[in-house]
Image (tube, rainbow, N blue to C red):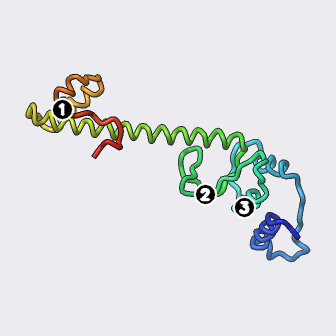
Amino acid sequence: MPDKSAQACNELLTNSPRANLPMSKQRLVTLPLDSLITDLLNDSDCRNISPEIAEILNLVADNKGNYHVQFPGEDEVGIDGNPINSPKLWSLRHWKNTSERHQKIKLRGERDRELWLVKEANIKLISKHLIKLAALNPEASQCLCRQMLDKGEFGKIQCIIGPTRRLYTSSKEMP
């Protein structure tokens, strides 16, 4: 009885446009997988491949190969950060480096967004108190608040917002 990967490959090949060719015109070839991958990548780290080839390579992968097949999806992006539209064949070493770099960039972006949200909430908080205290217009008040936060003048800020009120330190504390 043939294994599941062979059956799946056979299904893919049967449903491909080449399957309609007469049997005498079809040729089956057996190649070492490493040689096929080397030839497909052709001295590059990443290459677009057809969906049929991607499915076949994914089925026979067994996680021991020197390649990775990346399929289009919501979270799948290329090196340039744009979503991918077709499957890609990667050298495993290059894919790991790229995906790790992408993950670090994503985490840094999330952290920067968190810091920005906290800073903006603090500016609004201080500005609200400063408007009441000094009768400034909102734009001038926010400008002063931004300068005080950037310079780390927390003593002045505490005098403005009062001794019982604290600045936000994370987005979870914000209303």
Eye-nearest disc, 3 or 1: 1
Eye-nearest disc, 2 or 1: 1
Hey, which quadrant is residue 43 in on the image? top right
Mark nearer the N terminus (3 vs 2) = 3
Hey, which quadrant is residue 80 in on the image? top right
Verify CB contact (< 8 Å) between mark 3 and mark 1. no
Mark 3 secondary-structure assignment = helix
Residue type at mark 1 is: Ile
Q: CA distance from mark 3 to mark 2?
A: 12 Å
Verify CB contact (< 8 Å) between mark 3 and mark 2. no
Q: CA distance from mark 2 to mark 1?
A: 50 Å
Residue type at mark 2 is: Pro
Residue identifier under label 2: 72
Residue identifier under label 3: 55
Q: CA distance from mark 3 to mark 1?
A: 61 Å
- Left or right side of 77 for 69: right
Query: Residue at coordinates 79% horizontally, 48% vertically from top-left?
Result: 64
Mark nearer the N terminus (2 vs 1) = 2
Mark 1 secondary-structure assignment = helix
- Left or right side of 40 for 148: left
Residue identifier under label 1: 161
Query: Residue at coordinates 9% horizontally, 31% vertically from top-left?
Result: 134
Mark nearer the N terminus (3 vs 1) = 3
